[in-house]
Image: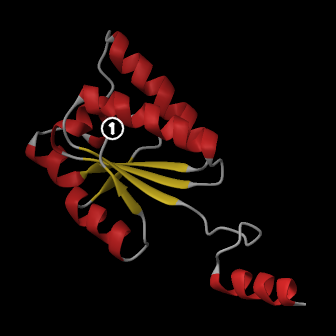
Amino acid sequence: MILGALLCVGLALGLCPLQAAAQTRALYHVGEGDEQAKRALLFINNHLQSDPAAEIALVAHADGVQFLLHKAGSETSADFAKAVSALLKTGRVKFMACGITLANRGIDAKNLFEGVAVVRSGVLTLADLQNSRQFAYIRP
């Protein structure tokens, strides 16, 4: 009887692994270029292997938008395109590029990989996803 009461208390307090966990929401922030983008893609793939139901967003701004662009004849661009496409196909990952960065650098949104969304402001989106949607912030 005491064991049953402790089990009920543990479940009510969320201390027991039998209770379903809330869906993980992770926000990856890329603003420094290709090396950081490579780490982010690796981390996201590892994240999904560990938690296939996770909801993941990647926001790129400043030098971070470069990895999301088609660059004719670039092997790195082709590798990034394949990786981004594969993650988008999972339905668990969203990629977003900063509209301010694109405008300031004269980059046409048509040059982004298919499926990459343009947000008005990368930093505003980072703050909004953390505050309003309770995404955990990760800077690879």
Residue 104 or residue 14, whichever sits in front? 14
Question: Please, is residue 78 above or below residue 102 in the view?
Answer: above
Residue 115 left/right relative to 106: right
Residue 131 position, x and y percent, is 34, 75
Quadrant showing the N terminus: bottom right
Q: Residue at x 50, y 24 (%)?
A: 82
Per the image, label 1 sits on a secondary structure element best described as helix
Q: Which residue lies furthest to the front in this view?
A: 2
Residue under label 1 = 110
Residue 39 in view:
yes
Q: Which residue lies furthest to the left in this view?
A: 104
Residue 76 left/right relative to 61: right
Residue 65 position, x and y percent, is 25, 38
Residue 91 or residue 120, whichever sits in front? 91
- Dividing the picture into quarters, in which one does residue 18 lie? bottom right
Q: What residue type is labelled 1?
A: Lys
Question: Please, is residue 71 above or below residue 126 in the view?
Answer: above
Q: Which residue lies furthest to the right in this view?
A: 1
Q: Which residue is drawn at 72% across and 69% down?
A: 20
